[in-house]
């Protein structure tokens, strides 16, 4: 099949031949003028072949976004039998999304997307002068203070946040108190499907604070918002080897099941600060260490303020509808978050947590030359 270069645009609705506009093409450097050693470049390939050929079938794929000065989306290449293909951004969250469809069952429902992204590690700078994630404007901060259906900020969420932060006036100290509370009171449950569902009200009401990243980091975000701190999850995928610790790294090229969400909290005068309490609990479980061990304490300290960027972020979107831009139609139901490929046929949404039946694969390759 002939390879075609597609470039990103915020409002593209194109068919089999065309350009998405403003994304740089493959081969450009990650950050002109920046120290090359600080950046890594990854190539991610999505291959999707729907096993359910009921027509019409629709597919949405999350694409890497550009985020401050720690991640830059570099290009997208399409190899596909599907038409039309559209790339758009969600109106509220700015999530870059690729959408396509197969109108008849006679068409083979297959698509392959290759995307490149550059990342560099985030390290907390207490002066705020080299904050790689940006400061955030008033509109952006207002969005990430609002509740959502799966993330209320009143009731038991608000009560818990007030208890945690009582008598703590400084925003940074409140953010740290919530982080410590989440690390100390949650646990990683290996039986949780996928990354969890992030229903924080249910977690607090039942006292079941186990789960995976979408549960634990959503709990942090909801409590932070309830305490008056803008906060958000960033849904993405692990994509390469790391130096911090073995359980937070991926080996090999197949990352189909390596999805991971992280979180950020906004501190006045500092901007967006990286946090990841879920990965502290992952290290405790998968590396079989006590929470008060020197290793876990090192990870705990590092993951309030820094991320190792052997991971790619897709978006901040939460509790929203995926759309078909040219038509204006939406998914039948809102989705809680967008970290996995999402497909729908007349029979309903396919199970994105079962990639073997869906069927899709995501692979990674680090570009070193």
Image: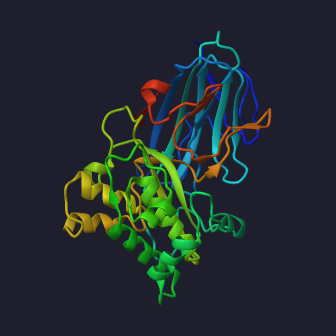
The mark tally for this picture is: 0
| Residue in the picture at 29% in, 52% down | 243
Looking at the rendering, which quadrant does residue 179 occupy? bottom left
- Give 76 or 343, whichever is nearer the viewer: 343
Q: Residue furthest bottom?
A: 167
| Quarter of the image where the C terminus is located | top left
- Give 50 or 362, whichever is nearer the viewer: 50
Can residue 69 be seen here? yes
Against 123, is 40 above or below? Answer: above
Against 133, is 110 above or below? Answer: above
Against 146, is 58 above or below? Answer: above
Residue 23: image location, x then y, percent: 65, 40
Against 307, is 18 above or below? Answer: above
Q: Is residue 222 left or right of residue 248?
A: right
Residue 246: image location, x then y, percent: 26, 49
Residue 192: image location, x then y, percent: 37, 47
- Give 253 or 256, whichever is nearer the viewer: 256
Residue 121: image location, x then y, percent: 42, 56
Q: Residue furthest front?
A: 206
| Quarter of the image where the N terminus is located | top right
């Amino acid at each position: 099949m002939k390879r075609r270069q597609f470039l990103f645009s915020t409002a593209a609705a194109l068919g089999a031949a065309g350009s998405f506009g403003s994304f740089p093409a493959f081969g450009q450097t990650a950050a002109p003028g920046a120290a090359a050693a600080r950046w890594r470049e990854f190539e991610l390939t999505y291959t999707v072949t729907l096993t359910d050929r009921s027509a019409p079938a629709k597919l949405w794929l999350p694409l890497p976004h550009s985020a401050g000065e720690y991640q830059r989306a570099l290009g997208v290449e399409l190899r596909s039998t599907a038409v039309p293909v559209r790339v758009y951004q969600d109106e509220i969250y700015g999530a870059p999304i690729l959408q396509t469809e197969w109108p008849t069952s006679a068409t083979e429902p297959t698509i392959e997307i290759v995307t490149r992204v550059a990342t560099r590690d985030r390290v907390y700078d207490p002066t705020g002068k080299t904050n790689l994630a940006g400061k955030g404007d008033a509109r952006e901060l207002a969005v990430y203070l609002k509740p959502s259906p799966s993330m209320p900020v009143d009731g038991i969420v608000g009560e818990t946040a007030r208890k945690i932060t009582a008598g703590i006036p400084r925003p940074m100290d409140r953010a740290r108190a919530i982080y410590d509370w989440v690390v100390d009171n949650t646990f990683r449950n290996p039986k949780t499907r996928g990354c969890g569902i992030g229903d924080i009200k249910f977690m607090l009401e039942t006292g079941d604070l186990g789960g995976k990243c979408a549960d634990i980091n959503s709990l942090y975000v909801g409590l932070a918002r309830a305490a008056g701190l803008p906060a958000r999850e960033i849904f993405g995928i692990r994509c390469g080897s790391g130096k911090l610790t073995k359980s937070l790294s991926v080996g090999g090229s197949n990352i189909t099941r390596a999805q991971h969400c992280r979180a950020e909290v906004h501190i006045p005068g500092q901007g967006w600060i990286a946090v990841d309490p879920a990965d502290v609990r992952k290290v405790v479980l998968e590396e079989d260490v006590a929470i008060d061990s020197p290793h876990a304490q090192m990870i705990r300290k590092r993951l309030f303020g820094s991320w190792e960027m052997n991971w790619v972020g897709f978006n901040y979107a939460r509790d929203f509808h995926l759309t078909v831009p040219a038509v204006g139609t939406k998914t039948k139901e809102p989705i809680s978050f967008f970290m996995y490929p999402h497909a729908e046929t007349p029979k309903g949404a396919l199970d994105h947590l079962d990639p073997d039946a869906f069927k899709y694969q995501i692979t990674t390759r680090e570009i070193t030359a």
